[in-house]
Amino acid sequence: MSEQRKVRRRHLIYYLSIFDRETDRLVGQLVDITTRGFMLTTENPIKTGVHMALRMVLPDVIEGDNQIAFDAVSVWCKTDVNPNFYAIGFEFESIAPKNMTIIENLIQEFSFLD
């Protein structure tokens, strides 16, 4: 996989929880995010090409919401630095414009300054 990023990854000051909207099960913890996708860590691997309906719990109310819903597809999966976990990359597939605004605000307000 080429590491040519058009959008810089932003690490947030919080590990936010990502849930499967269909089962309400925890999928993993958000590690970093861009307006194109995100990476999370999880205890279970997810094959590439898996389409998922997800929701993210926000660290605070943003634009009147404390969570957002979106669809994403897994694009890679590898063993994390901690071998008991997996790092998984996702791309956003379907996300409402308001939720993308929330993600932009999340990146602006809750990411590490660098």
Image (cartoon, rainbow, N blue to C red):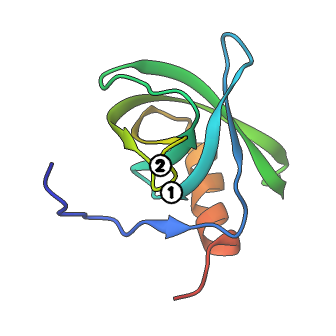
**Label 1, residues with CA under 10 Å away: few <14, some 14-19, many ≥20:** many
Q: Residue at x 55, y 41 (%)?
A: 84
| Amino acid type at mark 2 | Met
Q: Residue at x 69, y 73 (%)?
A: 109
Q: Could you say which is closer to the camera, residue 5 or residue 39?
A: 39
Q: Residue furthest top?
A: 22
Q: Residue at x 84, y 45 (%)?
A: 66
- Whether residue 10 sits left or right of residue 105 in the image: it is left
Q: Which mark is residue 33?
A: 1
The reply to whether discs 2 and 1 touch (Cβ–Cβ < 8 Å) is yes
| Amino acid type at mark 1 | Ile
Q: Is residue 101 above or below residue 77?
A: below
Element class at badge 1: strand
Q: Residue furthest left?
A: 2
**Label 2, residues with CA under 10 Å away: few <14, some 14-19, many ≥20:** many
Q: x, y (%) of residue 113?
A: 59, 86
Q: Which mark is residue 49?
A: none
Q: Earlier in the sequence, mark 2 or mark 1?
A: 1
Q: x, y (%) of residue 46?
A: 43, 25
Q: Residue at x 40, y 43 (%)?
A: 79
Q: Could you say which is closer to the camera, residue 59 or residue 47?
A: 47
Q: Is residue 92 above or below residue 16?
A: above
Q: x, y (%) of residue 31?
A: 56, 56
Q: Tell which tag, 2 or 1, sits nearer the viewer.
A: 2
Element class at badge 2: strand
